[in-house]
């Protein structure tokens, strides 16, 4: 079962990379989002717009939640995000797309920072 939530802050959905403002990157990232899960999440991809994660329960679409992102030795706190889409993998887990709604820094600079880390890996 695939569910998609439409929101203006999200520039693309699974399979629609050409609609994303920022390229997806594979990086070692830790996401703290207590409303999504008690344990840290490790996104499978990341951009300045959002990231994909694996969660153990079907997430509530559209609900805004606080989170922090740790990548490249830096922590970005005071972020607000929401579940943009999810897919039930039928094995007790869900893939979910998290869109960053509010970010404490300039997104273009954040994307440049991410791309710099990606080039080093």
Image (tube, grey):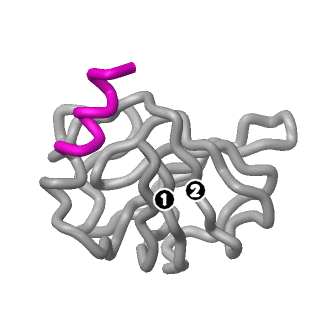
Q: How many marks?
A: 2
Give 104 or 12, whichever is nearer the viewer: 104
Asked if 94 appears above or below 63 in the picture, the reply is above
Can the viewer see residue 2 in this picture?
no
Q: Residue 71 appears at what percent x and percent y?
A: 45, 47
Quarter of the image for residue 90 reads top right
Quarter of the image for residue 39 reads bottom right
Q: Are marks 1 and 2 in contact (CB under 8 Å)?
A: yes
* Magenta region, residue range: 112-121
Residue displayed at 66% across by 51% down: 41
Left/right of residue 16 with respect to residue 66 in the rendered view:
left
Tell which circle, 1 or 2, labels the residue nearer the N-terminal end: 2
Distance, label 1 to label 2, CA atoms, is 5 Å
Mark 2 highlights which residue?
A: 31
Q: Secondary structure at mark 2?
A: strand
Give 104 or 4, whichever is nearer the viewer: 104
Residue displayed at 79% across by 66% down: 38
Left/right of residue 42 with respect to residue 63 in the rendered view:
right
Mark 1 highlights which residue?
A: 69
Q: Residue 58 appears at what percent x and percent y?
A: 73, 58
Residue displayed at 32% across by 22% down: 120
Membership of 114 in magenta stretch = yes
Asked if 57 appears above or below 91 in the picture, the reply is below
Q: Secondary structure at mark 1?
A: strand
């Amino acid at each position: 079962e695939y569910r998609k939530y439409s929101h203006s802050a999200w520039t693309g959905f699974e399979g629609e990379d050409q609609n994303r403002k920022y390229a997806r990157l594979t990086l070692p990232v830790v996401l703290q989002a207590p409303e999504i899960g008690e344990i840290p999440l490790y996104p499978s991809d990341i951009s300045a717009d959002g990231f994909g994660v694996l969660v153990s329960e079907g997430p509530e679409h559209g609900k805004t939640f606080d989170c922090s992102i740790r990548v490249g030795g830096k922590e970005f706190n005071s972020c607000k995000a929401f579940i943009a889409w999810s897919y039930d993998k039928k094995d007790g887990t869900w893939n979910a797309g998290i869109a960053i709604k509010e970010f404490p820094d300039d997104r273009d600079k954040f994307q440049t920072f991410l791309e710099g880390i990606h080039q080093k890996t």
